[in-house]
Amino acid sequence: MSKLVVSGGKSLEGRVMISGAKNAVLPIIAASLLTGERVRLDEAPDLIDVEHMCRIIQAFGGKVERCGTQLDIEVAEIQSCEAPYEVVDQLRASIFVMGPLLARNGRVRINHPGGCAIGSRPINLHIKGLEALGAQVEMDQGFLDVKAKRLVGARIFLDFPSVGATENIMMAASAAQGVTTIENVAMEPEIVDLANFINELGGKVRGAGTSVIQVEGVTNFHGARHTVIPDRIEAGSYLLLAAATGGDVFVENVISAHLQPLLAKMAEAGIAFREEDDGIRVMSSGKFRAVDIKTQVHPGFPTDLQAIFLAWMTRAAGMSVVVETIFENRFMHVDELRRMGAEIRVEGRNAIIQGKPRLFGANVTATDLRAGAAMILAALMAEGVSEIYGVQHIDRGYENIVAKITALGGKISRLPVAAE
């Protein structure tokens, strides 16, 4: 167990390199189950969630090797159809193995996945899509037992544009007989990255990034080499860290098109920035206006940036309103921010923030992954020293965050928590 100790009040300056996207690499690792040949992933972030997904691949009989940001995966033979409970229980993204393992092996057994407790995230759309392709789904002693002698293309309409369901159905359909049309799908950049990877394996996926995806099933997949897209949520987090601390920071390895909702709100708040070919430079005075946001499915404002944006608004001039439409339990960071002197009122899915000139260091807890980033931002803005607990959540999605912030001049360190 460890904690982060942060001394606030210092501007961040310099350059920071953004890692590969967590939310892209996890389904791509799962999709490596489609082929028996070696797959090489470049810019694969070294995160706890990635480590967990690799353990699941190994449990199925795969070989995984890491060298820096390069990940080699080879699943020559499926040796088991059951994902390990102790890993699945910690990783929401473990559900991604259902589609590709069913496509290749005809059966998968998996318990209901775990992850951050940010609200209800049912898997009914995953199951609905797989059943439409011909799968039979049963509950067996707490496990989902999914079987299919043959997957057949179908027309599927999602009741909600779920990212996970879109990805799982797309992976299963890539090996189904015939053509599958999936409507009302998610349009996130990570969907496009997965589709590109499947096509590099020999699949035939069209329409990713739009509301309709068409998948023509194929019978053979081969090996491939793929570079994971940059993490837009990590990039957005560092843009906000720079804006909040009055910093001058160049955020490198960024696809600006993936961040337009955030950049629009930063401009509205009075933050100066410049988009360049290989990144975005933020030049903040440390003073900013209150602005409102409403989380939405892509291309709207991403829910994964809500917590850190809300934390930023606690020191904005004026009153702001944050509306969370995706997850019903994603304001757990509010109580922790109040410990630091923030003035926030929650009414249902709305958080009303009255900006204050000062926050004060305190002992706080990262209640989930993105709340952890919010705690770090608030601590860097605050006067005095803060101790942040629950660091294991932060390590799930931010690679080398202590080293990256330290390189920008931030005062942050990781220390062990004394055993009681």
Image (spheres, rainbow, N blue to C red):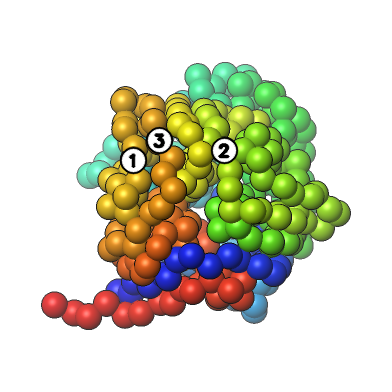
Q: Which amino acid, by three-letter code, is at mark 1?
A: Glu
Q: Which amino acid, by three-letter code, is at mark 3?
A: Ile
Q: Residue most toward the left? A: 420
* Front-lying residue, 237 or 379: 379
Q: Which amino acid, by three-letter code, is at mark 2?
A: Arg
Check if mark 3's residue and mark 1's residue have beta carbons within 8 Å: yes
Q: Quadrant of the C terminus?
A: bottom left
Which of the labelled discs sits on residue 209, or is there none?
none
Instruction: Tell which circle, 3 or 2, labels the residue nearer the N-terminal end.
Output: 2
Residue lying at 58% horizontally and 43% vertically, measured from the top left:
288
* Front-lying residue, 389 or 264: 264
Say what secondary structure mark 2 lies in.
loop
Say what secondary structure mark 1 lies in.
strand
Residue lying at 50% horizontally and 42% vertically, measured from the top left:
316
Residue lying at 31% horizontally and 33% vertically, measured from the top left:
345
* Front-lying residue, 127 or 210: 210
Structural distance between the alpha carbons of marks 3 and 2: 12 Å
The residue to which callout 1 is attached is: 343
Residue 224 % position (x, y): 76, 60
Nearer to us of marks 3 and 2 is 2
Residue 277 % position (x, y): 86, 54
Check if mark 3's residue and mark 2's residue have beta carbons within 8 Å: no
Structural distance between the alpha carbons of marks 1 and 2: 16 Å
Q: Residues within 10 Å of mark 3 (few under 14, many from 20)?
A: many
Rendered view: 27 above or below 248: above
Query: Where is residue 213, by image quadrant?
Result: top right
Which of the labelled discs sits on residue 289, or is there none?
2
Q: Quadrant of the N terminus?
A: bottom left
Structural distance between the alpha carbons of marks 3 and 1: 6 Å
Q: Residues within 10 Å of mark 1 (few under 14, many from 20)?
A: some
Q: Is residue 273 left or right of residue 5?
A: right
The residue to which callout 3 is attached is: 353
